[in-house]
């Protein structure tokens, strides 16, 4: 497929990815995803238009060409969400081309992403989150492993960390103070408060952790002493959720969702929660208002007197209400 990409287009892609890294601080995972998405697009256009396309030819891509590409992607089984992500990468690349080379890229930028239903985060209830912290790692015979897993999950829930952020901590971050400097997606730094139970959980783990402690080594260690893997934490939580009868959505990331949702329920404002989570956009954080509203409606439906009435009585009440309004 790479033969269908012209050297000029390949060089432009490399320059754009370099700019994303140096100027916007994009993470390696983001850069890799953009590279794959735009490479696939460029290869398709080369085949679709009859040969490798130079920069000027890429600027001549029209609405029908974009529709052909999107139809090919959907025909290959790509879901609406994944196609929307690919289209976003292509548009970002074209905006950069327009600024660098003065191309007219309206047909590409005007391509509409397919609609899809955004799934809401699935947090745990407060009592379930606490039960998870107590149960995680309990099936392991080694006290230090149980303490380690409890410390990791406590940080996820108590500080709203991503699993990658928790596992990137080193002994240089010790002793934990009242705040912690976290480097998140795109190498963006944020300061998060560390609650007392999280500090206590990490201290309890470090007191019995059997591996040597030297500067720069990972805070959370695997059985053989290397860095603890995300899969180990996921497996430990899988065992705990099965023992507790929790749904399959009780994952490490669900603890972060739980942190945000419970904070919002307690009166936290969206801007503060955005900063604590490290979201680049407030719209990403606003999804938790939908979660909170959905949960409120569940409580309302279960507790409202009308929910306890027979259907006929409810219908009668509605008729009475209508007559009163009239």
Image (cartoon, rainbow, N blue to C red):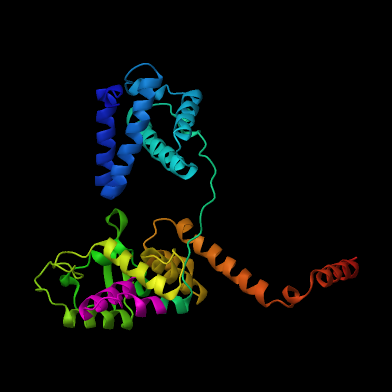
Q: Is residue 42 left or right of residue 107?
A: left
Which contiguous range is marked in magenta? 131-156
Q: Is residue 111 magenta?
A: no
Predominant secondary structure, magenta span: helix
Asked whether the viewer can see residue 183, the reply is no
At x 41%, y 79%, the residue is 131
Return the x and y of residue 250 as percentages of the image width and height.
42, 67
Q: Is residue 145 magenta?
A: yes
Asked whether the viewer can see residue 117, the reply is yes
Q: Find the residue positioned furthest to the top.
A: 50
Return the x and y of residue 168 as percentages of the image width and height.
23, 64
Of 258 and 139, the residue lying toward us: 139
Of 320 and 90, the residue lying toward us: 320
User: Which quadrant would residue 54 be assigned to in this image?
Assistant: top left
Quarter of the rendering occupied by the C terminus: bottom right
User: Vertically, is 322 above or below 63?
Assistant: below
Return the x and y of residue 225 as percentages of the image width and height.
13, 68
Return the x and y of residue 237 as percentages of the image width and height.
35, 69
At x 45%, y 73%, the residue is 245
């Amino acid at each position: 497929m790479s033969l269908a990409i012209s050297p000029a287009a390949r060089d432009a892609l490399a320059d754009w990815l370099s700019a994303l890294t140096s100027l916007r601080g994009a993470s390696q995972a983001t850069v890799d995803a953009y590279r794959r998405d735009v490479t696939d697009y460029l290869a398709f256009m080369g085949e679709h238009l009859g040969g490798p396309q130079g920069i000027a030819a890429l600027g001549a891509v029209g609405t029908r060409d974009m529709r052909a590409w999107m139809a090919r992607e959907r025909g290959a089984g790509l879901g609406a969400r994944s196609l929307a992500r690919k289209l976003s990468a292509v548009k970002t690349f074209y905006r950069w081309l327009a600024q660098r080379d003065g191309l007219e890229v309206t047909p590409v930028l005007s391509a509409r992403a397919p609609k899809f239903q955004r799934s809401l985060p699935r947090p745990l209830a407060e009592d379930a989150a606490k039960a998870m912290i107590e149960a995680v790692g309990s099936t392991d015979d080694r006290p230090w492993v149980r303490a380690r897993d409890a410390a990791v999950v406590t940080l996820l829930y108590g500080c709203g960390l991503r699993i990658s952020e928790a596992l990137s901590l080193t002994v240089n971050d010790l002793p934990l103070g009242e705040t912690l400097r976290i480097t998140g997606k795109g190498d963006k730094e944020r300061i998060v408060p560390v609650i007392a139970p999280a500090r206590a959980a990490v201290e309890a783990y470090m007191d019995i952790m059997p591996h040597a402690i030297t500067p720069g080594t990972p805070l959370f260690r695997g059985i053989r002493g290397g860095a603890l893997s995300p899969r180990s934490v996921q497996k430990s939580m899988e065992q705990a959720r099965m023992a507790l009868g929790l749904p399959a959505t009780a994952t490490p990331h669900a603890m972060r969702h739980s942190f945000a949702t419970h904070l919002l329920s307690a009166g936290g404002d969206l801007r503060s929660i955005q900063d604590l989570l490290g979201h680049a956009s407030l719209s990403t954080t606003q999804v938790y208002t939908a979660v909170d509203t959905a949960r409120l409606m569940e409580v309302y439906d279960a507790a409202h007197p009308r929910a306890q009435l027979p259907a006929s009585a409810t219908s009668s009440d509605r008729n009475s209400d209508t007559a009163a309004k009239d």
